[in-house]
Amino acid sequence: MGRVRRQYIVKPNIQIRYLLLLAGIIVVLAILIYYMFLDTLLSSPGMDQLSAGSIKNFVRTYTSGFFWVTLIFMSAVLIESIFYFHRIVGPIYFFEKVMNKISEGDFSLTVHHRKKDETVELAENMNKAIGAVRTVISQDREKIKQINAARDNGNKDEAKRLLGELMQWFKTEKAE
């Protein structure tokens, strides 16, 4: 059974900032659309035949309807965004925790992901990288055992050769 994360706001600074940005974009676009449609409606043929009171009532009704439609739309988009951000920011938060464990030298963990996460490929690649490092570490530990055995048996040349192979990973080429 897959793991389910129930906490939807895991990195509040990022998630709230993007929600506010999204809300701001929606409000600005709503204002632009409101005035564009209002201007179009008021300048349409036949509007000049209406009385000032009728036009005022029309604008009031249009404004009220537009406000409620915008509020409902913005609420739906922001709620959906929380769930969408959860599929992106949640895994990023988990990756940060995994990378902290790896930086402490713990390579025993694996990166879990949910089917709907947007970072499935990244999780799989991280698992491959952790597995590769785990393999190299176990190979190096085996070499160290061989070096210790050769040293204990008095075979210093074999121990030096094995140590040279082990140290090859740490050598870098000099910049020219």
Image (spheres, rainbow, N blue to C red):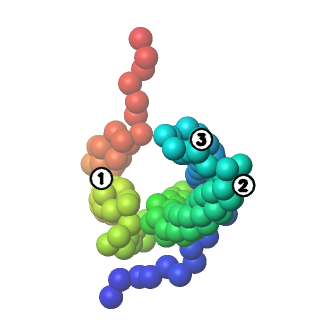
In the rendering, at what x and y percent does residue 126 appear? 37, 58
Q: How many neighbours does mark 2 have within 10 angstroms: few (below 14), some (14-19), or many (20 or more)?
A: few
- Residue at mark 1 to residue at mark 2: CA–CA distance: 106 Å
Where residue 106 appears, as percent x and y from the top left, is 49, 66
User: Which amino acid lies under the numbered mark 1 shown in the image of this protein?
Assistant: Asn
How many discs appear? 3
Q: Which residue is mark 3?
A: 48
Drawn side of residue 91 relative to residue 63, left or right: left
- Say left or right for 56 vs 96: right
Q: Earlier in the sequence, mark 1 or mark 2?
A: 2
Q: CA distance from mark 3 to mark 2?
A: 12 Å
In the picture provided, is 7 more to the left or to the right than 126? right
Mark 1, Cα crowd under 10 Å, few <14 / some 14-19 / many 20+, is few
Q: Secondary structure at mark 1?
A: loop
Residue position for label 2? 53
Q: Which mark sits nearer the N-terminus, 3 or 1?
A: 3
* Residue 124 visible, this orientation: yes
Residue 120 higher or lower than 44, as above or below: below
Q: Looking at the picture, does residue 57 appear above or below residue 31?
A: below
Which quadrant of the view contains residue 161?
A: top left
**Relative depth, front residue between 44 and 65:** 44
* CB-based contact (under 8 Å), mark 3 and mark 1: no
Q: Secondary structure at mark 3?
A: helix
Residue to which mark 1 is pinned: 155
- Are discs 1 and 2 less than 8 Å apart at CB? no
- Foreground residue among 52 and 122: 52
The label nearer to you, 3 versus 1, is 3
**Residue 96 spot, x, y in % from top left:** 54, 60
